[in-house]
Image (cartoon, rainbow, N blue to C red):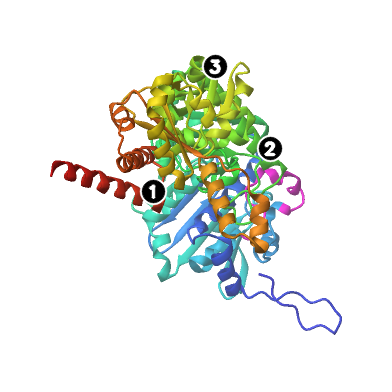
Amino acid sequence: MTLPRPASPDGADRAFQVDLRGLVDLLSHHLYSSPRVYLRELLQNAVDALTARRSLEPDAPEGAFGIRLFADGSVVRVEDDGVGLSEADVHTFLATIGRSSKRADGIAEQRGDFIGQFGIGLLSCFLVADEIHVLSRSARTPDAPAVEWRGHGDGSYSVRTLPASARPRPGTTVTLTPRSDTGEWTRPAQVHALGRHFGSLLRHPVTFSDGTAGGSGAGVLVNPEPAPWARTYPTPGSRSRALAAYGEEVFGFAPLDTIELDLPAVGLKGIACVLPEAVPAGRRHGHRVHVKGMLLSEQADEILPEWAFFVRCVIDAESLRPTASRESLYEDDTLAAVRDALAERLRAWIARAAASDPELLDRFLRAHHLAVKSLAVHDDEILRLLLPWLPFETTDGHTTLDEFARTHRTVLVTSSVEEFRQVAAIASAAGLGVVNGGYTYDRELVHRLPEIRPEASVADLDPATLTAHLDPVDRETELAASAYLALARDALAVFDCDVALRTFHPASAPALLVDSREARHERTRSQLAREQEGGLWGDILGALRQEAPRAQLILNQLNPLVRTAVAIDEPELARTSAEALYGQAALLSRRPLRPAESSLINRSFLDLLAHALRKDS
């Protein structure tokens, strides 16, 4: 809060004049996510002061220095046994915006030991109070006096020196008198909850009191236990159960499994909790990140790569840098290296599950197979690890590619769901191994199977492959049905559909309509080109025109309905029966019907009904 200098001659340097109210409004709307961060900032300052005190007195017993929170509805107080401030420190660090004590001589080289490095944390208190009272005594100078600093929301402040008896021990006490409109953040219960929220993993003891248990000196610990991964357990099983229970407490779901994270190079420890249910591919969940025990963020999605959306993490790190708001991580080389190292830990967990715990891997893939497929397309390592285990829809039912490739030397894959549904039953009866490639990523992944299993052969299913496996009828049957087949081809010419007679299983299927989406598109384009003959548009379409493949209606001689139909000698009834068989096959393909096909189905049904009524009359 630098006060303006007196007017100076033209050309001389002048100091910026700071409107503190405007700056606080800027911080509240653009830097901090909520007024509740005021307590985190006070805790952070206290922790950094304790860290500096420990560096002055490294032989002090563990737990000798701590932090005490107090709230009774009228004031909020945070007291620490840290290094404290001298009168010169107060003028230097509390009266200058952006100046941090962590930049002081002799401490700058140790800034990595401190959470805050930006010197604006105390300003966050103006989000909930119009006055900040600081009483401090330095531990660097024996018999140092106490120093009182009062800062006001209008930008003014006062400093005075008090006798050492005003604060018998070194450290700092910050007292806030909350405004009436900030009660939701400063009530005793809320201060206690915020203390637990931000400080549950702090390494220094933090106590809270509301004055009802003997004054501010008495209180309850807000961090009674160290982080669960830092505790000792009698057995590996009890450790796993404790970590899972902690993950459920933090995230609100029982993890499918927990993955311990440990990166000694950056002082990172924590756990990744595997989500028990599927999540949409690409959805990123926020992770809970602590820095030196202080909660930094609950939505830090930058700590893991985008593909790791099937886990949520809670970690504590020593060497990650927070941003100025201390609500996210600074993107630097260290964070990038940490992200890569954590990705390797997740891959290693998948590899261990694949190698030694197939039941766990099965549960994981049943929940996240769609997400893992999207990952495997872009990650060769995941592809290698998991492709043989991923489930696909096949003519043998839902099975893994590994099992399917053992049964079928050549794996055929369709380009669409409707194509698979057209041919699945008949291909299965013919002994063909077909995989439904119509779902997102599936066709691309099936074609990469030979990278994992070189002995496997993968090919796209085309009509010729299927029809080659259908048995021809004998010559006499073909000749007897030739007149009917000619009438059927003529009736279905409007759909560019050929008609053939074969035998295939199951016998309950009267007909198979073989027609790919690409072929239909090409016929539509050719039809448009014919309608637009002449002119620039016709020339363009004509240049693109190819010989459009025709659809095929393959009638099954083994089916009683077909045997009855091919024996019809009345031309109009034969045409109607062929249209009805085409309509039935189109419906069984489950693809969207064109308007002409819907009309044909209705018309053929009415014609057959009319024929039956005429015959009965």
**Crowd rating for badge 1 (residues with CA inside 10 Å; few <14, some 14–19, many 20+):** some
Q: Is residue 109 a member of the stretch shown in magenta?
A: yes
Q: Provide residue 302's location: percent of width, then percent of height.
A: 60, 45
Indicate the secondary structure of the residue bearing disc 3.
loop
Question: What residue is disc 1 on?
Answer: 597
Q: Can residue 390 be seen in this view?
A: no
Which quarter of the figure is the N terminus placed in? bottom right
Q: How far apart in space, not on screen, are marks 1 and 2 (Cα)? A: 59 Å
* Boundaries of the magenta span: 103-120
Q: Nearer the viewer, mark 3 or mark 2?
A: 3
Indicate the secondary structure of the residue bearing disc 1.
helix
- Sequence-wise, the earlier of marks 3 and 2 is 2
* Residue nearer the viewer, 34 or 471: 471
Q: Residue 337 carries which label?
A: 2
The residue under label 2 is which amino acid type? Ala
Contact flag, marks 1 and 2 (Cβ < 8 Å): no
Question: What residue is disc 3 on?
Answer: 409
The residue under label 3 is which amino acid type? Arg
Please count the marks in the image. Answer: 3
Q: Provide residue 512's location: percent of width, then percent of height.
A: 40, 32
Q: Residue 345 carries which label?
A: none
* Residue nearer the viewer, 588 or 307: 588
Which quarter of the figure is the C terminus placed in? top left
